[in-house]
Amino acid sequence: MNSIYEAYQVLSMAERALVFLVLAPIAGGLLAGIDRKLSARLQGRYGPPVRQPFFDVLKLFQKERIVVNKFQNFNIILFFLFTACSGALFFAGADILLTVFGLALAGTFFILAGFSVGSPYSHLGAEREVIQMVSYEPMVILMAVGMYQATGSFKVADLVQYEAPLILYLPGIFLGFLYILTIKFRKSPFDLSMSHHAHQEIVRGITTEFSGPALALIEITHWYENVLLLGMVYLFFGFNPWIALVVSLATYLFEIFIDMNYARFKWQLTLASTWLFTAVAGISNIVVLSVMK
Amino acid sequence: MNALIFLIIFPLFIAALALVLPAGNALRKTVGVIAGVVLSAVPIYLLIAYLDTGPVYFRVGSHLVNMVMLAVEVVIAAFIVYISLRSKRYLPIVLVAVQSLIMVTFELTAGGTMEIEHSLFVDKFSIIMALIIGIIGSAICLYGIGYIPEYHQHHKEIKERRRYFSFLIYLFLSAMFGIVFSNNLMWLYFFWEITTICSALLIGYRNDKQSIESSFRALNMNLLGGLVFAIGLVYLYNSSHIMELDKLIKLDRNLVLLPAVCMAFAGLVKSAQFPFSSWLTGAMVAPTPVSALLHSSTMVKAGVYIILRVAPALENTVAAKMLMFIGGVSFLITALMAISQSNAKKVLAYSTISNLGLIVACAGINTAAAVWSALLLIVFHAVAKSLLFLCVGIVEYKLDSRDIEDMDYLIMRLPKLTAVMMIGMAGMFLAPFGMIISKFVTLKAFVDTNPGMAIVLAYGSAATVFFWVKWMGKIMSIRHGEIEVVAHRVSRWEWFTLDVLAVSTVFVCLAFPLISSGVIDPYLTERFGNVPVPDFFNVMVTFFIMVGLLVLLPLGLFYFGFANKNYRRVATYLGGANIDNVTFEGAMASVQTIEMKNYYLQKYFGEDRLFNVGVIISLALLCVMFGVAFI
């Protein structure tokens, strides 16, 4: 059971980062494939093969490069770079706050990409994306804070090898994190800024004006991000790698299930409910931890 | 010691010259440039000269000086009474009368026997402040040379008082140097009051109804702060017979608590923390150089300066906790209110209060790590925020509006200015530049001492990102086609200042490990005996990302702007047949025009909703703070 940790410890930080950079898109793509298959089955359709996301991305790369202004794709490249970097730092075992801030920076570039094209749908999508970011950001920071309170370290390498089950110290934080994961995974009811489903009232939202290779890059970035987020879920159960892996996967399936069962919220409800949930679950957990210490 | 006295006296001399030399004279500009060079060079000299020494104290024969200061104070008091009578406002008269009565009686009864060992001092913190005041202050004065004539072209109704304006600015700089170098609390108090009156007069520069209103609001609040300051000093002398800053923080906790709380109160007023935030948002009617200099980079920093100075005297008391909470409340609530503002200067004002709140909270915690990030916050905020104010000042005249909603496509209309503005914004909120480094450390300091504050920081940071990102998105949106470029009408004085500040912003971001190890760490060692050791790996990663971005951005812009030809440009999708970039043919052959507006979430974060909440909470906290000091 500890073979995973032994392998982890043998690798240097650079090697761990490299492993993430190579494997994450594969894992992320497969997850996306499972997502589509499962969603289809839940809706009574047959669904595409699990490999379909890879075909889609490869095809997008071969498409013509159509833009509305010549600078628009630069922000997307930065979005990709910083998401990948954050993930690499996380899996290398660096400071979790560094990952959190890096992810926020990447998200900011994505939003700026949406604003920069000057299209009304994209603008509205970007505006909603900001609101989503504001909604989930407090909980992400509180997650790092809670883990530090429980273990005394911000280092992912220490967190993952913490002997006691973190979930027992951080049940509220975990629930809060689960709540905002729906936003991060861009699932209903929180897929306001762009939706994978073909029923969005603002066309394709923030990505309306992005096509071809740029859209492919957005997709790959999304895969990296998903793997990173599941890595964060893993930390809560790091005391036992097998349980942790199973729970991470189960979390992903759970989000798909939520996605199928909810209609999209308005941004007002998204913001208010997330902040409230963060306040109740996250803050109470942190207060209890600080009293315990 | 001569350098310190020089820095206090020299701006006075320039102020006198500014009053005498006729407006529009070439000699004025020469004097301005020379003053700028000297005022930037002397603090740098101080930095080099005192780099390896601890705090140095100086004895200055002070009885005569005290008498002169008292006389000036009385003159100022008479002046305040005069302007208040002229505008039929009586509150300032009451405040200033009580204050003068206290100070004159005190000086005449106790002043003769008062023994002051060291009147002036210099340490690393003073030098940091002096560098900010000297370099940013004089750069903003140069900006004023280009700005003020244009200001009067746009506002023909305002009487031109350029000489009066320069006089006040240089007088103010002198007082600021006085504040940061004074060890004698009577002197500190004297300079403090001069900044109050300068600020109020500069806010009222336009001399119309609104600015007079704002001017008196600022005056009232800061006079109240000054009054409490004076009471604190008298109490301090009567109970312990000392009147020096360095002795104050070494005194027994019971004697020193009340005076320290009084001084912290004056600091809270000056740095516009809740419940006194309204004077700073009102102060935005002043000409832009005033907002940039007094209300973002220097005078409000005097408030947090004094709080950080007296913080050791409050250590481990309930009063310090209250200070921390007041800072936290101000940080959070003003960040939320900034979301609901579309007036660019007001957003900047709220963001200023918010950042000062964070510094006050750090001072309340008063651990080595918290003070480390407080000092870095002061530095980063001073450069980036003054840069942003000055940019908005120019945009305001080029577009005839300071509303963010009118800044569409700014990057096409004023490309270079927008680039500079983005540097400032990146310094304010974008990881890994500037402020975020301090927030990173602040968060760790908060978690270690009071996790409740970590929650405040989590929500506040999210709000901060909100108002900056939507503004940044607004100015960098691009549309195809020609738009008139208006940049060439910006004067070279203004450009020079913007360039200096933009380079400084980038420089302090990149050089933060140096600033930390060279200036801040020695100061912390003197004060706490230990230095917070930032994780070396984190610093390296942060540094690497910053350098990476600085290399990537120009390269990327060059590639996409000139090198990359492999694309096909199409019109944006508008939901109909495009006519041009902003109009399309909709249903029934109707012509539809698109307009893009930002969210301001008035219903949730409006001033009317949140302001009172902040005032009530902070008033309660203030009451507790004074309550524990009295017991």
Image: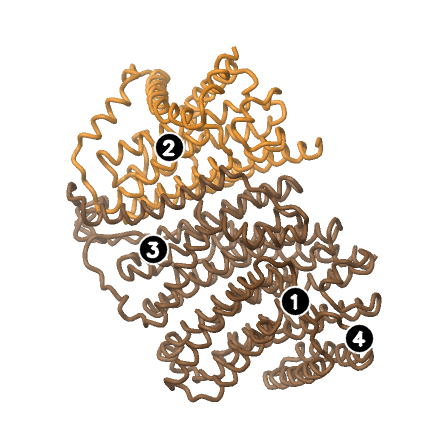
Chain colours: A orange, B brown
Query: How far apart, in angstroms, are the residues tagged by discs 4 and 2?
Result: 65 Å
Q: Are marks 3 and 1 on the same chain?
A: yes
N-term-proximal mark, 3 vs 1: 1
Q: Looking at numbered disc 2 in the image, what kind of residue is underneath it? A: Ala
Q: Looking at numbered disc 1 in the image, what kind of residue is underneath it? A: Phe
Please state which of the two labelled residues, at mark 3 or mark 1, is closer to the viewer. Answer: 1
Q: Looking at numbered disc 3 in the image, what kind of residue is underneath it? A: Ile
**Measured from the top left, where is residue A291 in percent x and y?**
71, 34
Query: How far apart, in angstroms, are the residues tagged by discs 3 and 1?
Result: 45 Å
Q: Chain of mark 1?
A: B
Find residue A84 and name its label: 2
Residue sitting at 51 percent across and 49 percent down? B604
Q: Secondary structure at mark 1?
A: strand
Q: Are marks 4 and 3 on the same chain?
A: yes
Q: Nearer the viewer, residue B68 or A190?
A: B68
Q: Are marks 2 and 1 on the same chain?
A: no
Q: Chain of mark 4?
A: B
**Measured from the top left, where is residue A109 in percent x and y?**
36, 43
Find residue B114 and name its label: 4
Q: Is residue B185 visible?
A: yes
In this picture, is B497 found above or below B75? above
Query: How far apart, in angstroms, are the residues tagged by discs 4 and 1?
Result: 18 Å
Query: How far apart, in angstroms, are the residues tagged by discs 2 and 3?
Result: 27 Å
**Measured from the top left, where is residue B538 in percent x and y?**
49, 39
Query: Is the residue under label 1 in contact with that under label 2 (CB below 8 Å)?
Result: no
Q: Looking at numbered disc 4 in the image, what kind of residue is underneath it? A: Met
Please give the residue where the numbered disc 3 appears in the rendered image: B475
Q: Chain of mark 2?
A: A
Please state which of the two labelled residues, at mark 2 or mark 3, is closer to the viewer. Answer: 2
